[in-house]
Amino acid sequence: MTRPTNRSGPVGVGIVGAGNISEQYLTTLAGFPDVEVLIIGDLMADRAEAQARRHGVGAWGKAQDVLAHDGVEIVVNLTVPAVHAEVSSAAVAAGKHVWSEKPIAVDPAAARALLDQAAAAGLRVGVAPDTALGPGVQTARRAIERGDIGSALSAYTVCQSPGPDAWHPSPEFLFAQGAGPLFDMGPYYYTTLITLFGSVTRVSAVGSTGRKVRTIRTGPRAGTEFTVEVPTHVAALASFESGAVSQSVFSFDAPLVREGIVEINGTEGALVVPDPNKFAGDVRVTRGSAGAGDAQWETVESVASGGGRGLGVLDMARAVRTGAPHIATGELGHHVLDVLVAIDRAVATGETQQVASRAGAVHAVPPDRDPYAATL
């Protein structure tokens, strides 16, 4: 754990990467009094400038300008997955804490090296997704811990669609190594499951690639073809330290869209968790045994406050000031990546894979925490 800083007031944030996801981060962070975005950097400085002007950020430039900014305490790394570890490592070398979009790296060894580098420097690493800090997953966590469905036994999750080439103007990176439906969407679902069940111990999986070549279907580059490098349909089984098990589908090959499905079965009932890719939503529970049409569902009273992408940055910023642990840690991000790589390896080999890493303690969000309060 790092010691608290001797600074006061909002924590200075610098963003590296001014692509699509930066819009959500910048919108969310602007509403949190405890953080202040000071500068945006990007390979294309004009893109950084456009986002800075759009959101009232006072400075912009390249990545190195963000790392050199004296007021920046946390670098928010929103680059493409292939360079996540490289950019985060450079930020740590510059003396900055790092919040990284998922995944933390494209391989566990690079993730481990980053975490060791940060620990040696007394700096923090936080990793998306931070949706598990929202009221949806936090309410589900408390319901399970309270025993609302008895002992949790299993989970069933589905995330399937035709794929992001249908809506993203530059989707190639989502079909490259380190992405695909497993690495793009899997972090949301496994971060949620690990929050609810604890660390994963072993996995099995099968997968396929529906089309080796895809075509961009929207934006100025519509009609452009690109090569698919990864499986685009994965079905995975996982075992957890708690004894619970899960079965999950991740697909970019499904004409029928079914996303955000997380169902938890227990000894005395079942619980439906909101979409792990979102922060809020109703948690519903049914008890006893009944047919699908006969189940009596109740909505569980929500806990914790809302937020959006950047909620984990705020949690880490407050922890930097106070010295308390933050929730979406680098160790959690490393474990999630380890799980995804093990699933990918299981697809390739056809063999069950053991998962050596562990997430460590995943702390709950205090139910009275208000992200919109000025506490620093």
Image (cartoon, rainbow, N blue to C red):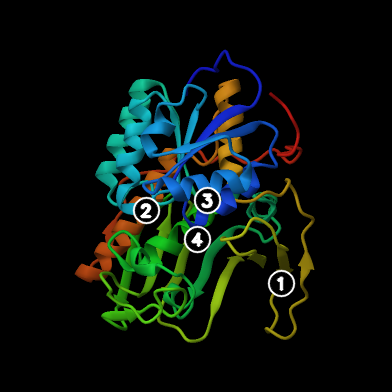
State if disc 2 and disc 4 touch (CB < 8 Å).
no
User: Residue 216, image x and y in percent?
Assistant: 39, 77
Judge whether residue 133 can be spotted in this image. no
Badge 3 element: helix
Task: Name the residue type under label 2.
Answer: Val
- The answer to which of marks 1 and 3 sits earlier in the sequence is 3
Q: Quadrant of residue 259?
A: bottom right
Residue in the picture at 59% in, 65% down = 264
Residue 176's disc number: none
Q: Quadrant of residue 287?
A: bottom right
Judge whether residue 16 can be spotted in this image. yes
Which residue is at the far left?
349
Cα–Cα gap, marks 2 and 3? 12 Å
Question: Closer to the camera: disc 3 or disc 4?
Answer: 3
Residue in the picture at 57% in, 13% down = 6
Cα–Cα gap, marks 1 and 4? 26 Å
User: Residue 372, image x and y in percent?
Assistant: 74, 39
Location of mark 1 (residue): 288
